[in-house]
Amino acid sequence: MTQTTTLAARAHGDLASMTGKVALVTGGGTGIGRAAALGFARKGAQVVLAARRAAELQQVAAEVAELGGVAEVIVTDLQDPDAVVSLVERTVARFGRLDAAFNNAGVASFSLIDQQELAEFDRVMSTNVRGVWWLLKHEVATMRAAGQGGSIVNTSSIAATGGTAGLSIYAASKAALDAMTRVLALELGGDGIRINNVSPGMTLTPMNEGMPAPMLDAIAAHTALKRLAQPEDVGDVAVWLCSEGARYVTGQSILVDGGFNIPGAR
């Protein structure tokens, strides 16, 4: 197929379509992961839902089914290396392929450094950095073996490039993902595998429940759009990054923050 023919086909097709594709979503039971899983299903993908809590995953799987889609639930803890390997193997065993992965699962941490303990550092890093790195290793191996390329998206954060007191551990874990993504884009591009990050601002998810309303209002006021993000605002970007519409985007950490960082991170 010539380049002209390819461009013509794209012009008449749905570049956002994921029909026939298989997408893996970690942290798929709530928040941004749930929103992305439903987004993948709406675009025609078969979805693998992974997280630590089965009940939440089953609920999302039921929502996927209501959309006419197919979802597989695989309970997984990213801190367990064997469980991560099993997750990828079971995905391929169930659907025969892996085209897209949204590595969204992560844990938060908020405390000043003189209040932190080594166990807290290890907990965050073992999930947000080591767990994602180990998952990436096996997702990449699977995509390379299939020889059909693929797209991987990780969830980073505006904390990776900004500065907020109390986020030293969490920010470091997300900055590691930004660096890892840049390097892997160079390693994987020749295989047709793209890798990017979404970097959300404050998003109304269960992870942020309980934050004082005045603090949330202040953050919203600092954004250009004068509101906080809904999970779908971020999940839809992750789905797009895995689609043909983002075919020339790789190695990027894309801010999805409503313009929060324009006047300077807080």
Image (tube, grey):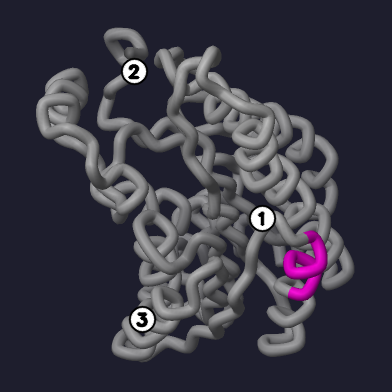
Of mark 3 and mark 1, the one earlier in the sequence is 1
Q: What secondary structure is marked by label 2?
A: loop
The image quarter containing residue 13 is: bottom left
Amino acid type shown at disc 3: Gln
> What residue is shown at x 80% (from left), y 60% (from top)?
81
State the residue position of label 1. 3
- The CA span between labels 1 and 2 is 38 Å
> Is any atom of residue 13 visible in this view?
no
For the residue carrying disc 3, how many other residues have a C-alpha within 10 Å: few (<14), some (14-19), or many (20+)? Answer: some
State the residue position of label 2. 261
Residue 246: image x %, image y %? 53, 49
State the residue position of label 3. 59
Amino acid type shown at disc 1: Gln
> What residue is shown at x 23% (from left), y 36% (from top)?
211
Q: Is residue 2 left or right of residue 168?
A: right
Nearer to us in this view, 83 or 132: 83
Number of on-image labels: 3
